[in-house]
Amino acid sequence: MKNTKTLIFILLAFWMISCTSQQEPGQVEVEGGTIQGTVTEDLTIFKGIPFAAPPVGDLRWKAPQPVETWEGVKQTTEFAPAPMQGGNPPSGKSEDCLYLNVWTPAKTADEKLPVMVWIYGGGFSFGSTSEPVHNGEHLARKDVVLVSVAYRVGQIGFLALPALSAESPNGVSGNYGLLDQIAGLQWVQNNIEAFGGDPDNVTIFGESAGGISVSMLCASPLAKGLFQKAISQSGGSFGPTRSTTYPGENMKTLAQAEQDGVEYLEKFEASSIDELREVDAEELIPQGWTMPGSWPIVDGYVIPDDQYNLYEKGKYNDVPVLIGYNSDEGLSFPAGRTPEEYIETVTKRFGPYADSLLQAYPVGENTVPRSARNLMRDAAFGWPTWSWARLQTKTGKSPVYLYYFDQHPEYPEDSPQADHGTPHGVDVPYVFMHMDQSNPNTTEADVKTSKIMGTYWTNFAKSGNPNGENVPQWPVFSNDDPKLMILKTEPEVAPIPDEESLKVMDAYFEWRRTPEGEEWAK
């Protein structure tokens, strides 16, 4: 009888301990402590999870440090402030900005769902995870865990200085924003299982600067093993370094960036880094698009070398990629508003290759038509993406899926917009399936295209292959028979658009990598 009472007491005590240790719905244990998210009928949503210490004070212009612990349960139900920038993001802005968000459909922690990690764009000068079109709820409902990660932008995210390099254990400076992204991916590796995600099945994806970031992470040894697949929308970073940068030739060397930083430092009359760290963050950020000091650089550490060279040598993170660009990116990045401006800009930028490029991308007598705008499309997005596909297919083992996004209204022939295609950034709400938020004139064709793209993207995240039921077959890219998928209401496989013009652009970039081309670019 005594043994029976003892056994009952032990079982009761074990039951009481189990009950008291059981977490409330929407509570998860992560690095730093316990967080409480918002539980809905089919998703649990966490906003504003810290993944690193606030990069303020002495941590300004330093690599992200481990997250600080907290007592009790942290409420993660509102977006954290975006990084300091010239604009006004929906959630506000602050130097204390290293937070991420999670949308998960998992009911238990052992579901091992695919994980998609979103990296926002904004030219490395702007950006926020709180933009409505970045809301991950619709993609998460397609059985993936969706994560969006913040990173520092502008001069706070990318400033290089000799003094900053000297104090760094790696002897480099700049690229803090990329290090933030890597820290976010490390957090995913260490914590995503608690949200029902699979750390061995992570896909990074982003658009514009986010797509360029994806490209850079694919080339960075620091990101090795942190993701298994990659999607780049209007990204790619395969142009050579150049002291005077242009879209598609945005990269500088560490030495060039440090010199820019010295000139930047002089504006604030600060005699030391310590003094510059005391300057109010608002004063450090210009209100418009800014360069220099606000773009990643070839630092020899985060980015070891010219990415084209790295890929030629097979020195990159060889994972399946889904990459592409929009049909009329040049609408957003024109080379000139008039024929005269266009010719002047092309001549200044491309030098001895200007004449051949003006023939490949001709301008009108009184207009700058689509044919001319395509020069900027291809210089900034088409050529880098096409080169990425060709190089990885040549030197890697993982498949490449190439696309060309061409969903847009059909304008009347006599309209000023008659030759307009799909401009930069339009693809984002399609991928996130937020057409209702992006345009009051959304059509049924837009909604259909969005569902197709959401399916392709999540299929790819699950298996490394976008194909599946209810979507047209998308072939793997081949150098022997180069084809891509034109994404629109009725997707179709087609040859590379404007391939002959791209070959002229390719000849320019090949020349730029010769001693003559390098010397000219100085």
Image (cartoon, grey):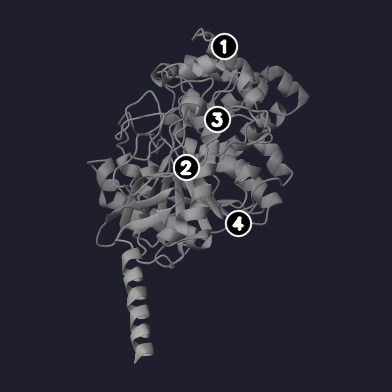
Q: Could you tell me how far apart the alpha carbons at marks 4 and 3 are, in whole angstroms?
A: 36 Å
Q: Residue 180: where, in percent of width, then height?
A: 51, 38
Q: Could you tell me which residue is drawn at 42 percent across and 62 percent down?
A: 196
Local secondary structure at mark 2? loop
| Residue at 46% over, 23% down | 364
Which circle's residue, 4 or 3, is located before the other in the chain?
Answer: 3
Residue 83: give x, y in percent of width and height.
41, 31
Number of other residues with Cα within 10 Å of mark 1, as a class: few under 14, some 14 to 19, many 20 or more = some
The CA distance from mark 1 to mark 4 is: 44 Å
Position of residue 167 in the picture relative to residue 157 (left or right): right
On the image, the x and y values in percent for residue 250 come to: 57, 27
Which residue occupies the extreme bottom position in the image? 1
Q: Residue furthest right?
A: 515
Residue 308 as seen in the image, left or right of residue 2: right
Between residue 516 and residue 255, name the one nearer to us: 255
Q: Quadrant location of residue 194?
A: bottom left
Of labels 2 and 1, earlier in sequence is 2
Q: Return the mark for residue 399.
A: 4
- Name, please, the residue furthest toward the left: 440
Residue 67 disc label: 2
The residue that appears at 29% across and 61% down in the rendered structure is 25
Give the residue pinned by disc 1: 263
Q: Which residue is mark 3?
A: 62
What's under tag 1, amino acid-wise? Glu
